[in-house]
Image (cartoon, rainbow, N blue to C red):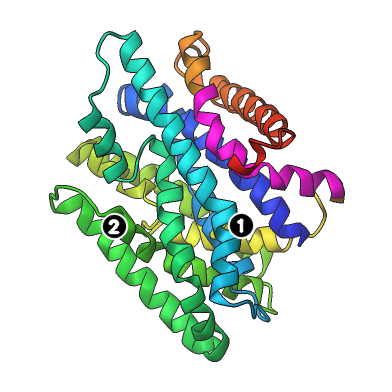
């Protein structure tokens, strides 16, 4: 479907923008102009990862999916397992090489710890969440197929309520860590919501959706600053959580808006080609952001109002080009 291809492309660009905006939020003085520039951009980009999960739900829970669990797992292994293993190994090597060049290479225990917590590199948590979500998809399909829409909606809302409460408690109560195979549980509501939105015959008023999207983005930015000013940035970043009380409505309204956009971004064929490369862009773009930063073209090297879109565009273009080249190499194309 064209709107899902459009959604993938826009969501992956928003991911790159979000990661480009992280540095001003983390390193600029709280409340400064540079910090606010990063905060606003980051806040309004938070819909991106939930939209990716909803796209998966729209596709994998679509009515009429009758393939067996074995067939489903074989397809997913071909699509996810190879990138999962390849890029986990690649980024562990990347971390080791960087440490070696700085004179303090990580130990084997350090690298194993990264694997154990599901973050060989900061962005790969998404794959570590997605794999268990795919494992339970054959169990969710009969539930979705046999349940009335009203029951699914109630289940989804209950799931969001629990996940949102967990996100709040995670910022209030100290804890030693999380068990990454259980991460997917918090994202099941988005998975179900993707199906509900994709199959919804009604389209909410676009004006209302834009008001929710913009209002939620503003509340995310202002809430982050207000809470960070009182309790520290780590606590204020609650509002950036993909399951915060502001991001959930932002993501849902964004998905409905994307569904209403039926024209391809760049022609039907080109849009499908770009959509097929989005996984590669996701996996590769942190390398370009980091290289640009080390080359003096980071988001704090000049005004973030200009640097964030410039760095994001350059990283996106570079990752897209590399993904395109990898996709043309038979031995490597399965890695993206």
The magenta stretch spans residue 285: yes
Residue 281 x %, y %: 60, 36
Q: Where's residue 81, x and y in %?
A: 50, 51
Mark nearer the viewer, 1 or 2:
2
1 or 2: tag closer to the N-terminus: 2
Q: Which residue is mark 1?
A: 210
Q: Which sits in the foreground, 93 or 246?
A: 93
Q: Quadrant of the rendered structure where residue 73 is?
A: bottom right
Residue 233 is left or right of residue 84, and the answer is left
Q: Secondary structure at mark 1?
A: helix
Q: Which of these two is toward me, 108 or 64?
A: 108
Position in image of residue 165 (x %, y %) = 27, 65
Is residue 243 shown left or right of residue 289? Answer: left
Question: Is residue 317 among the parts visible in the rendering?
Answer: yes
Relative to 33, 312 lies left or right: right
Which labelled disc corresponds to residue 167?
A: 2
Magenta span: chief secondary structure: helix
Q: Which residues are magenta?
A: 269-288
Image quarter where the C terminus lies is top right
* Relative side of 294 to 117, left or right: right
Q: Are marks 1 and 2 in contact (CB under 8 Å)?
A: no
Q: Work out how far the residue at label 1 is from the one at label 2, CA to CA, in angstroms.
A: 25 Å
In the rendered structure, find residue 261 and report the number of the disc placed on it. none
307 up-or-down from 132: above or below? above
Residue at 78%, 49% in the rendered image: 272
Q: Residue at x 46, y 11 (%)?
A: 294
How packed is label 2: few (under 14 Cα within 10 Å), some, or many (20 or more)?
A: some
């Amino acid at each position: 479907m064209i709107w899902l291809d459009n959604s993938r492309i826009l969501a992956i660009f928003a991911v790159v923008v979000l990661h480009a905006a992280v540095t001003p939020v983390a390193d600029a003085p709280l409340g400064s102009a540079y910090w606010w520039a990063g905060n606003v951009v980051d806040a309004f980009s938070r819909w991106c990862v939930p939209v990716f999960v909803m796209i998966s739900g729209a596709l994998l829970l679509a009515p009429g999916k009758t393939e067996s669990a074995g067939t489903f797992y074989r397809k997913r292994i071909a699509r996810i397992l190879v990138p999962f293993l390849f890029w986990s190994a690649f980024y562990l090597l990347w971390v080791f090489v960087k440490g070696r060049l700085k004179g303090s290479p990580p130990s084997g225990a350090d690298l194993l710890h990264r694997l154990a917590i599901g973050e060989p590199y900061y962005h790969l948590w998404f794959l570590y969440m997605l794999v268990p979500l795919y494992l339970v998809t054959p169990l969710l399909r009969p539930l979705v197929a046999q349940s009335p829409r009203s029951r699914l909606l109630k289940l989804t809302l209950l799931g969001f309520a629990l996940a949102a409460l967990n996100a709040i408690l995670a910022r209030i109560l100290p804890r030693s860590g999380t068990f990454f195979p259980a991460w997917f549980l918090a994202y099941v509501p988005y998975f179900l919501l993707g199906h509900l939105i994709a199959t919804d015959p009604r389209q909410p008023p676009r004006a209302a959706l834009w008001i929710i999207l913009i209002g939620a983005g503003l509340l995310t930015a202002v809430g982050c600053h207000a809470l960070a000013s009182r309790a520290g940035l780590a606590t204020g970043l609650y509002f950036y959580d993909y399951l915060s009380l502001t991001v959930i409505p932002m993501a849902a309204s964004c998905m409905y808006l994307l569904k209403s956009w039926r024209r391809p971004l760049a022609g039907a064929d080109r849009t499908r080609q770009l959509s097929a490369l989005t996984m590669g862009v996701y996996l590769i773009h942190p390398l370009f952001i980091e290289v640009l930063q080390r080359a003096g073209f980071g988001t704090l090297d000049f005004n973030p109002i200009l640097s964030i879109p410039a760095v994001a565009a350059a990283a996106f273009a570079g990752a897209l080009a590399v993904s395109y080249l990898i996709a043309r190499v038979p031995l490597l194309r399965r890695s993206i």
